[in-house]
Amino acid sequence: MLARTRNFRDCVLRAIAIAIGEVFMPQLSVIVPTFREAENLAVLVPRLTRCFREAQIDGEIIVVDDNSPDDTVGVVAE
């Protein structure tokens, strides 16, 4: 499901970076398991992003969706 939450361009760029040896190694990875969490993600992801920026942390947010019937994937894609 991780690939569904990222846009195609980001996946391609990451694959290229790995192929040429320039791999992003985050200082912190936050894994967010989701199911019917569209409303919560709309709040959580911007908050986490702001915290990373304010703390000057190179981080990543990994959203794992279990085929939610709501718009969880759409919210993450934004």
Image: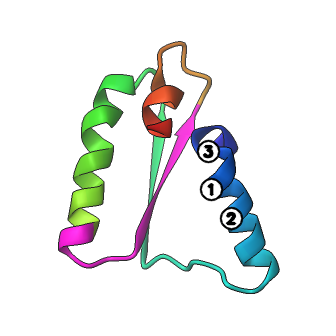
Looking at numbered disc 1 in the image, what kind of residue is underneath it?
Asp
- Residue under pointer 2: 13
Q: Note whether 63 is above or below 67 in the view shown.
A: below
- Residue under pointer 3: 7
Q: Quadrant of residue 11?
A: bottom right
In percent of width and height, residue 49 lies at: 30, 58
Check residue 17 for magenta coloring. no
Looking at numbered disc 3 in the image, what kind of residue is underneath it?
Asn
| Distance CA(mark 1)–CA(mark 2) | 5 Å
- Could you tell me which quadrant the N terminus lies in? top right
Q: Of all residues shown, which one is farthest toward the top?
A: 69
Q: Note whether 54 is above or below 46 in the view shown.
A: below
Secondary element at image label 2:
helix
- Residue under pointer 1: 10
In percent of width and height, residue 73 lies at: 53, 30
In percent of width and height, residue 43 lies at: 24, 37
